Amino acid sequence: MSAERDLTIALGKGRLVDQTMELLGKCGIHCEEMLDKHTRKLIFRDQKHHLRFFLAKGPDVPTYVEYGAADIGIVGKDTILEENRSVYEVLDLGFGKCRMCVCGPKEARELLNHREMIRVASKYPRIARDYFYNERQQTVDIIKLNGSVELGPIVGLSDVIVDIVETGSTLKENGLEVLEEVCPLSARVIVNQVSMQLEAERIRSLVGQMRAHL
């Protein structure tokens, strides 16, 4: 591959975009039109640095990176774990920090302590299954939800939930609490495995610049 080809970077849509572009700006990389909330463009270029950007739904970013449609992706650790794609995770950006937790009413703590058969609702069934089966060695019934998982224990669908927790205020307002922490989360940089070999120098240089400005 020519060193002049564009490196393609996929960014997960949402609040991580502004923080990512701010970091890249410190590295001298700018793409102002990408921050235009009204633009209908799908692909954005920084011609000076031979970079190409596009926005995608978070869960799709690891897919684009695994299949080589993007050389680099920036997305939350929760998405990386849930999608379980064959990519290299090369840098923890440190922003977008939160936690993946097991949550529920306080009485559900006893169900966890005794490793009883329980129902677990989550937007992240892979993460939930891995935690309960491999970390806790506890057999559970995983229920996939797409909306407000806090409803699960409230309406009796599940005993507990596995979900992202930032401040915990939503849990508290609904009579729930953090029972166990599954893992810490933050934004990460992932790289396509082939790109890491063919464009190693350019990718390492870019990742090194990002690391230096964290």
Image: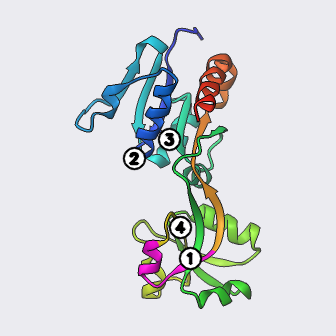
Residue at image point 75% right, 68% down: 135
Q: Nearer the viewer, residue 141 or 170?
A: 170
Q: Position of residue 201 (x, y in %)?
A: 67, 17
Mark 1 vs mark 4: which is more N-terminal? 1
Confirm or deny contact between disc 4 and disc 2 (CB under 8 A): no
Q: Position of residue 88 (x, y in %)?
A: 67, 37
Q: Specify how the rendered protein is coloured.
A: rainbow
How far apart are labels 4 and 2 at the CA level?
18 Å
How far apart are labels 1 and 4 at the CA level?
7 Å
Position of 197 relative to 168 (above/below): above
Residue 14, numbered label: 2
Position of 214 relative to 113 (above/below): above
How far apart are labels 3 and 1 at the CA level?
27 Å
How far apart are labels 3 and 4 at the CA level?
20 Å
Mark 2 vs mark 3: which is more N-terminal? 2
Residue that carries the numbered disc 3 in the rendered image: 61
How far apart are labels 2 and 1 at the CA level?
24 Å
Q: Nearer the viewer, residue 72 or 98?
A: 98
Q: Position of residue 48 (x, y in %)?
A: 44, 11
Residue at image point 50% right, 32% down: 23
Mark 4 vs mark 2: which is more N-terminal? 2
Q: Secondary structure at mark 1?
A: strand
Q: Secondary structure at mark 3?
A: helix
Q: Which residue range is magenta in the image?
A: 169-179
Residue 87 appears anywhere in the view: no
Q: Is residue 18 magenta?
A: no
Q: Secondary structure at mark 4?
A: strand
Residue 103, numbered label: 1
Q: Nearer the viewer, residue 26 or 154?
A: 26
Give the label, 2 or 3, closer to the camera.
Answer: 2
Residue that carries the numbered disc 4 in the rendered image: 163
